[in-house]
Amino acid sequence: MGNSIYRFLCGLCAPSSSEHGLHGAHPAVAALGRDVLSFQSTSQVPDELSRHVVSSKKAQANWYKKLLVAWKKARPPPKTPEEAAAFVVQTLKNHQKADVEGLLSFYGLPHPNAAAAAAGAPAARPPPKKAQQGAKFELHTLPIDPKSVADGDTVNVYVDAADPREAGSVPREVQKAAAERARARAAKDYQKADALQKVIVDAGYR
């Protein structure tokens, strides 16, 4: 009887998913939120995460501890993929870039350059009104990460596929795979999500 009353009272006191900001969130954000919040009771990180990051399980647990504290303090918690990516980047800003990118990829969240912009990093300089003399192409890229500049003549840049100027160029199968991957991640079907991620990467997207 006592245990039943205790469980009943705990049920009344336990915060609901909506109180933690999961209600109405994007599927990818909801997947991140559920994993972060479940870490409080299980101290476990997703099994498939190690396939996307370079650090140990012990290090991964440390990330989720930080993410859990930050998630509870967030007012409000992130709702969109861009907000969630910015949240992860800010919370894990002192960790390895490869790990942060891998974590974002695992949940189907945007590249850290886009997240940094959403978090309030200086925006890229607006393109000039007119193309410079002799210019044949004009690239509208996300802010460039200095760490992506490998040497004097090589640099990796990214464009935002959600930008109307770019969206029309994204193959329909990539858009479909991205949407299905977000749903698979939300349903914790990591095998399907990984297969869809391979489709996206093989097509030249992230």
Image: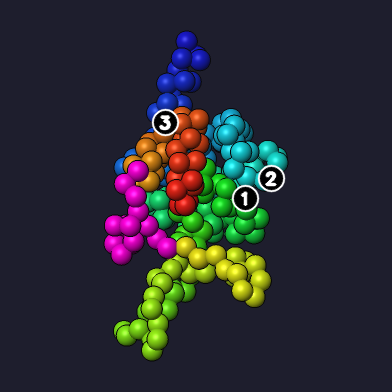
Q: Residues within 10 Å of mark 1 (few under 14, many from 20)?
A: many
Left/right of residue 198 with respect to residue 50 in the rendered view: left
> Marks 1 and 3, how far apart in space?
23 Å
Determine the secondary structure under disc 1: helix
Left/right of residue 174 with respect to residue 91 in the rendered view: left
Determine the secondary structure under disc 3: loop
Residue under label 1: 99
Reply yes or no: does residue 7 show up in magenta.
Answer: no
| Amino acid type at mark 3 | Ala
Determine the secondary structure under disc 2: loop
Residue under label 2: 55
What residue is shown at x 37% (from left), y 37% (from top)? 180
Residue 136 screen position, x and y as percent: 38, 78
Reply yes or no: does residue 162 show up in magenta.
Answer: yes
Residue 17 screen position, x and y as percent: 39, 36
Up-down relation of residue 204 to residue 117 (above or below)? above
